Image: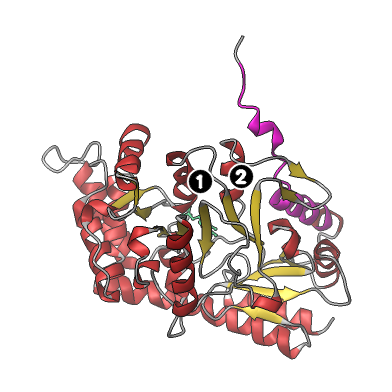
Amino acid sequence: MFKINENYLKLPGSYLFSTIGKKVREYSEANPDKKIIRLGIGDVTLPLVPSVIDALHLAVDEMAEKTTFKGYAPDLGYEFLRQAIATHDFKTRGVTIALDEIFISDGAKSDSGNIQEIFGVNNKIAVCDPVYPVYVDSNVMAGRTGDYLTDTGKWSNVIYMPCTKENNFAPELPKESPDLIYLCFPNNPTGSTITKDALQKWVDYAIQVEAVIIYDAAYEAYISEDNVPHTIYECDGAKSCAIEIRSFSKNAGFTGTRLGFTVIPKELKCGEVMLNSLWARRHGTKFNGAPYITQVAGAAVYTPEGRTQTMEQIAYYMNNAKVIREGLQAAGYTASGGVNAPYIWMETPKSMTSWEFFDYLLTTANVVGTPGSGFGPSGEGYFRLTSFGSYESTIEAIERIKKL
Ligand code: PLP
């Protein structure tokens, strides 16, 4: 008789966004006259920029002609896109990445969830707490963790690195040595980031303990301060210990269009085996490429017009972030983030739990955010607001919160 992967049974239901949806639905049904403002979910709201749309139209037309039609994409992705990435995301930062070190994908969620496959099941992972849940859940599914402990909200056999206000929401080097270290900067959910010097310490540490850093830089485009690394490869030695994952979702609004990439330098080896070769093998076997039209659209993001237009969108979201952060602070709340990331991380007032504050905000201000405890035990007592709403609704949400 067939057997299932019992690791899946260990996963508690992913209740965060479904519980939020249910609570909002119920409240809105009971109070149809209330205008609810949603600053909870991390999805963009502005449309694709004109240069991306133009590129998409042209690529669609190419697909209509026998002479320009494209079938399966090359395994690693089209060279024109990998070249644009190598030039604009890395060369401009003083980093040389070869084209065969870049793997085009359908987004950072798939890559950050799938990358663990090339590592042995007996590796120990270290994650930030709070954390983007994909890193942990994908390792649970693979059998790399112990059990979920309901009393602590943690998995056994996982190293948690608390990110709290005491450490400015940047993890400290763990006492126990991990094999795989997941880092995400700028961070979801805390909106914090890391300086180049601090990231260099992580790279040095990973080399020392012979661990691999899986560096999720999905929010790189939101970095506004100097001395915040745009890629982990700005750090010395990172090519021998780090994988970097990127996305077109938040810099160019591709959440529904789907495009991302992963960089695995050839220097990154386990003994004589290059992780690049393992990922190439996995990619070639299990993935048939991001669509041609999407890759053409992705390349348009790197054109001068594409860059100007997407940067305008980021500036729009970051202005919302400023409105939220400064508005909350003016109202007496403790809030951080929103400077190099589209997320604002606020402390819940009056010792309310994250969920108590969720209910309070929904019912008194009709504003929806995300309870910090949904991202891990160290998120308890915190609340995440996102800057992806419209300027008008963001202003209104903050005005309502200020009046509470
Ligand atoms: N990584 C982080 C940290 C995220 O917050 C998200 C989306 O919210 C993703 C990856 C997913 O990106 P993509 O849309 O490219 O799958």
User: The magenta stretch spans which residues?
Assistant: 3-27
Query: Percent from the top left, x then y, of residue 84?
Result: 23, 63
The residue most toward the left is 67
Could you tell me which residue is drawn at 73 percent across and 90 percent down? 330
Tell me if label 1 and label 2 are in contact, CB under 8 Å: yes
Q: Which residue is mark 2?
A: 137
- In this view of the protein, can residue 370 be seen by the observer? yes
Q: Is residue 401 magenta?
A: no
What amino acid is found at the position of numbered circle 1 in the picture? Gly
Kindly report the secondary structure that dominates the magenta region of the rendered protein.
helix
Would you place residue 117 above or below residue 40 in this image? above
Q: Assign a secondary structure to mark 2.
A: helix
What amino acid is found at the position of numbered circle 2 in the picture? Asp
- Near-viewer residue (70 or 247): 247
Q: Assign a secondary structure to mark 1.
A: helix
Q: Which one is earlier in the sequence, the residue at label 1 or at label 2?
A: 1
Quadrant in which the N terminus is drawn: top right
Indicate the quadrant where residue 127 lies: bottom right
- Near-viewer residue (51 or 347): 347
Q: Is residue 22 magenta?
A: yes
Could you tell me which residue is drawn at 29 percent across and 68 percent down? 90
Query: Percent from the top left, x then y, of residue 256?
Result: 46, 52
Q: Which residue is mark 1?
A: 113
Could you tell me which residue is drawn at 21 percent across and 60 percent down? 83
Distance in Å between CA atoms under marks 1 and 2: 8 Å
The crowding category of the residue bearing disc 1, from other C-alpha atoms within 10 Å (few below 14, some 14 to 19, many at least 20), is some
Quadrant in which the C terminus is drawn: bottom right
Indicate the quadrant where residue 139 lies: top right
Query: Percent from the top left, x then y, of residue 135?
Result: 56, 50
